[in-house]
Amino acid sequence: MGSVGVVGAGAVGQAVATTLVASGICERLLVVSRTPDRAVALVADLDDMRQSTASPVQPEARRVADLIGCHAVVVAARASFTNTRATDVRMGGAVANGPVIRTLGTALLFPRIDPATVPALVDGERTLGESDFMSGATEDRYPDHFGLAHGIDGGGSDLARATVAEHLAALPHHQVVLGHDVTANADFLAKLADHL
């Protein structure tokens, strides 16, 4: 895999970035943070780790616009807020982080992969559904290697998922079809981003 982006240099972003460097799963790791100094500091730590473990992953502090063309982007952004909720505490985060996520993107893309196709926009509407959220039923796709989840359902409550879907619904929606030609896909997505 070529490049992976991580948006957020807090605890979750650090854990994801560290795991990516340790795994060697990608060539480049692009780290973005609303606080650029945190991204630079995290990248310095990741680069030390890369050198000591001989990882092939090259970490870089970047801007959001540089994430176009990444094979995957992990959004681990956290708005600056104090969670005052005594119950359903994830809802506090969903409400605070929804606008942050909306600001990061200019559009929500729903890709479909067809190995023999040329990258293109596809007509039709699509919105977020239950299958777009990680839940207890799908958690095994993302094993808890470090034992941090303690059995918590990664998908959050029904209300949290509905709130996130509502915030993301404010973005323009586009369906795209991508092929197996990574360069053609990246060129198409870069051109598409210029017009969103």
Image: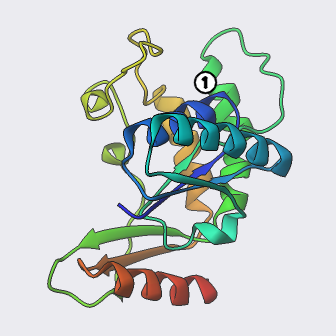
Residue 179 coordinates in the image, percent (x, y): 25, 80
Left/right placement of residue 114 relative to residue 154 reads: left
Residue 14 coordinates in the image, percent (x, y): 62, 34
Residue occupying the point 57% across, 35% down:
49
Depth check: give the residue in front, 21 or 159.
Answer: 21
Q: Is residue 118 above or below residue 49?
A: below
Dividing the image into 4 quarters, which one contains the C terminus? bottom right
Disc 1 element: helix
For label 1, count other residues whose C-alpha is less than 10 Å away and answer few (under 14), some (14-19) or many (20+). Answer: some
Dividing the image into 4 quarters, which one contains the N terminus? bottom left
Asked whether residue 82 is in view, the answer is: yes
Residue occupying the point 44% across, 44% down:
55
Where residue 113 sits, quadrant-wise, is bottom left
- Mark 1 highlights which residue? 90
Q: How is the image coloured?
A: rainbow
Q: Is residue 91 above or below residue 41?
A: above
Left/right placement of residue 63 relative to residue 108 reads: right
Residue 150 coordinates in the image, percent (x, y): 43, 9
Residue occupying the point 72% across, 64% down:
63
Q: Which amino acid type is marked by label 1?
A: Arg
Depth check: give the residue in front, 64 or 82.
Answer: 64
Depth check: give the residue in front, 71 or 88.
Answer: 71
Asked whether residue 122 is in view, the answer is: no
Residue 94 coordinates in the image, percent (x, y): 64, 35
Depth check: give the residue in front, 122 or 116.
Answer: 116
Residue occupying the point 61% across, 24% down:
90
